Image: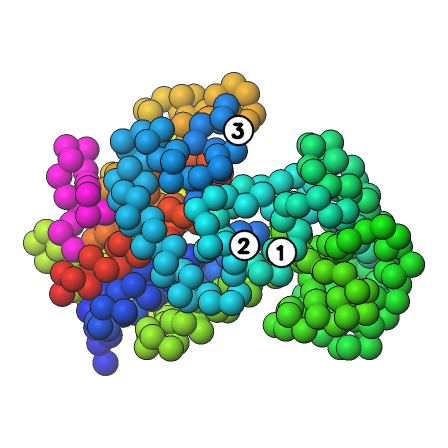
Amino acid sequence: MAISEDVVIVGGGLAGAISALSAAKAGVSVRLISHKESTLRHASGLIDVLGYPTEDDPPVVNPFDALDALPDSHPYSVVGEAEIREGLALFDEITGDLYAGDHTDRNALVPTQQGTVKPTARYPRSMATGIGNDRAMLLVGFESLPDFDAPLAADHLEAVGVPFASRGVTVRFPADLRADAKLTRFATALEREETTTALAETIEHHIDDAERVGFPALLGRDDCGSVRSTLESHLGIPVFELPGGPPSLPGLRLADRLFEALDSAGVHLSTGVPVVGHETEGDRISSVLVDRGSHTPQPYHASEFVLATGGLVGKGIDSDRNGVHEPIFDCHVPHPEDRYEWFLGEAFGDHPFARFGVVPDGKLRPVDTQGNLEYENLRAAGSVLGGANIAAEKSGSGISLATGALAGRLAAEAI
C-alpha cells in the first residue's frame, strides 16, 4: 500500500523532531524518516542559542541582544527573534522538568568535563547545581573512565577564573565493570541503590570543605533524578552532572523525550532507512524515495516536505572533487570553485566550509543560483541551512529549534 502523509520530514535529529512536532501540533498527518541513530547521542545535551557572535567576541550574556551583529545570510536573520523564541517555547513544552533555563534570556555558564565553561540557554536540570555562585566544588572521576580527568578539569576551571574553589579526585568505581566498559554500563550500575550507596561512602571521605559535588554525566541511564537524590541524601550536599563528549547520556535522555513526544503527537516514524532520491510533478516534489532493502526504492508521498538532514558532519551536505552539494534534492549550495578557498591556513579560524549549506527564502524554501525556488513545497531546517558557523558560535541547537518549529508550522499551513 502506498505511503502518503500531509507532511514528510527527512531527518531524525533535533531539527527534524521539532519540525515534525510543530507540524503535528497544527493538526496534519506527519511522517518522520530517519536513517542512522539520532545525532543527539553525540551532543552534550545543552541547548546553545548563541554563545559567540564572532570568533573574537567574549561570550554573550543575552543571545537576543547579539542578533543584530549577525550577517543577513544567517538563519537567525532569516527567521527573526520571534521565531527563535517560538522554537524555545516548543522545546520547553516538550521537555518539561527535564530541562532548566527558561526563567531568563541570559546565557548560563555551565562547567564542562574539559574544565571549561560554556554559555548555553537551556541545560539539563541534572547540571543546574554546577552553574555559577561561589560554593566550593569537588569533581569526581573514576579510575576506569580515562576520558575524564577530574583533578585536571578542576585545575582548568580555576585557571579560567571561575568564582569558586574547585578540586578534583579520582576514585575506584564501586562495581565490577570491564576496563573498556561503555558509559551506559556505569549509568545502569548506578541505578542499583547498593552501588550508589557504595559510591557515596567512597566519596564522603573526600568532601572536606566542598559544598557541591560534580560527576561526569553518567548518574543513571533512565532515572537520573533518583541517583542524584540518593547521593545527595548520603553526602548532605547537592550533586550535579558535567556535560562531556560522545556518547552522551544527556543527549540520549533528550532523544528519548523527543521520541516520546513524537509518539504522543501521532507522528509516524520510519527509522533505519535512507532517503535516496525524489520524484517531482512540475515544480513540486511528489515523493521521496526510501531504500528499504528491496530492488526498487519505495516512494513516500506527501504534499509538503521538510529537509532536516544536517550539515557537512551529518552528511546532509556532501562534498567531493567536483564541489559541494545537497544529495537528496540537489539543492544549490554556494561555495568557492577553488577547493583551496574552502579552508583557512590556521586550524581554528572561521573556515568558509563551516558555513556551507542551502540558501533559504523568508519561508525557509531553498533557492537556486538565481534566487528562484528549488521546489514550491520543500523547506529546510537545522544545520543543512548555510550561513552560520554553528561550532564557533555555539548556535546549532537554537538554529535547529527556530527553523524546525517554523518549517513544520509553515508546511502544515500550506496543506
- In the rendered structure, the answer to whether residue 348 lies left or right of residue 239 reads left
Relative depth, front residue between 60 and 266: 60
Judge whether 134 appears above or below 405 on screen: above
Using the rendered image of the protein, determine whether residue 274 is visible from the camera's viewpoint.
no
Relative depth, front residue between 314 and 183: 183
Q: Position of residue 251 (x, y in %)?
A: 55, 59
Q: Position of residue 89 (x, y in %)?
A: 37, 58
* Number of numbered markers: 3
Nearer-N-terminus badge (2/3): 3
Q: Label 3 is placed on what type of residue?
A: Pro
Is disc 1 placed on a helix, strand or loop?
helix
Quickly name the residue at label 2: 123
Q: Provide the major secondary structure of the magenta segment.
A: loop
Q: Residue at x 64, y 68 (%)?
A: 224
Nearer-N-terminus badge (1/3): 3
Does the magenta run of residues contain 364? yes
